[in-house]
Image (cartoon, rainbow, N blue to C red):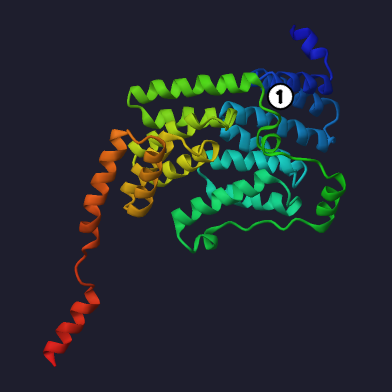
Amino acid sequence: MSQKTKARSWNELKQAGNQFFKAGQYGEATRFYSLAIVELHKSNPKNVEDLSILHSNRAASYLKEGNCTECSKDCNTSLELVPFNVKSLLRRAAASEAQERYRQAYVDYKTVLQLDANIVAAHDGANRMTKALTEADGPAWRQKLPAIPMVPLAVREKMSRAAPTVTPTTAAAGGDVPAEGARRAGALREQGNALVKQGQHVAAVDKYTQSILCHNKEPAAFTNRALCYLALGRYREAVRDCDAALALDAANIKALYRRAQAYKELQNTTACVRDLKELLEVEPGNSAAVKMLQDVQREAPKQQAAPPPPQEKKKRTRNRKK
């Protein structure tokens, strides 16, 4: 087997990697892309375009495995060889987002949109990052961003002539999600569930994140990760995960309840009550939601009964002195 592998050309090794990737065997895909990279370096190191593609392909495999660090490294190499490679930018953005490096992810998504304004994955990603950064840094979040590179006109014109179709799935993940990818996502989700039962919420978050990277169309992965974020006191992230789950299933009971829990902790009574009422329209007999709604509505008047503002106190004090 090893002798046959060594005898293969870099292109044959690449094609083998592609087949393993399509079958959802990402570890084997990574191995063959690595062999192809080594072989191409030996045979034609000046072939920067194909080297860039190989590194981008291996990045897709790493991303599927949840290895965001190695994914980012390969994307960096790919982009050094061929700047403004759309797939490499999107894969690096997805890896940065998974690692909560929201500023870098935003920059990459916006760079992609300079290259092709019709890429849905980049629009959706930029919108998610805008929301996350606004919550984290406030209205001045743009001032903390790294510089967004300006794509040269010649590169944009070349892109428009090529006009490849990049869907959300192919852009971020490297290809259509095969059945094996969905199966792996389910297995990772079960591993996360086992960790939750053991109280290991940080480790569970990592498993759910890997599951989402394999297949991001399953609401349970988002609602389960939201549960972990609630346990860790990361309420805004819990809200975002519930938003994602509800985008997939608008009547998802767990998503509505856990988002209500997060809003309660964030003291956003209006949003909390809204979610609980919407939940009870779907499932009127949900006793946990009924109790939380009663508690929130009972506590709301107390929260609103704030003492007079300090400025008013100062005015009255000054008036008495006069």
* Closer-to-camera residue (219/28): 219
Tell me: 12 left or right of 22: right
The picture quadrant where one finds residue 45 is top right
In the figure, 276 relative to 47: above or below? below
| The furthest residue to the left | 320
The residue pinned by badge 1 equals: 34
Which residue is at the far top? Answer: 1
User: Quadrant of the image for the N terminus?
Assistant: top right
Q: Is residue 284 above or below residue 38?
A: below
Up-down: is 310 above or below 183?
below
- The residue at the point 75 percent across, 51 percent down is 115
Q: Residue at x 34, y 42 (%)?
A: 261
In percent of width and height, residue 66 lies at 56, 29
The image quadrant where one finds the C terminus is: bottom left
**Element under label 1?**
helix
Image quadrant where residue 69 sits: top right
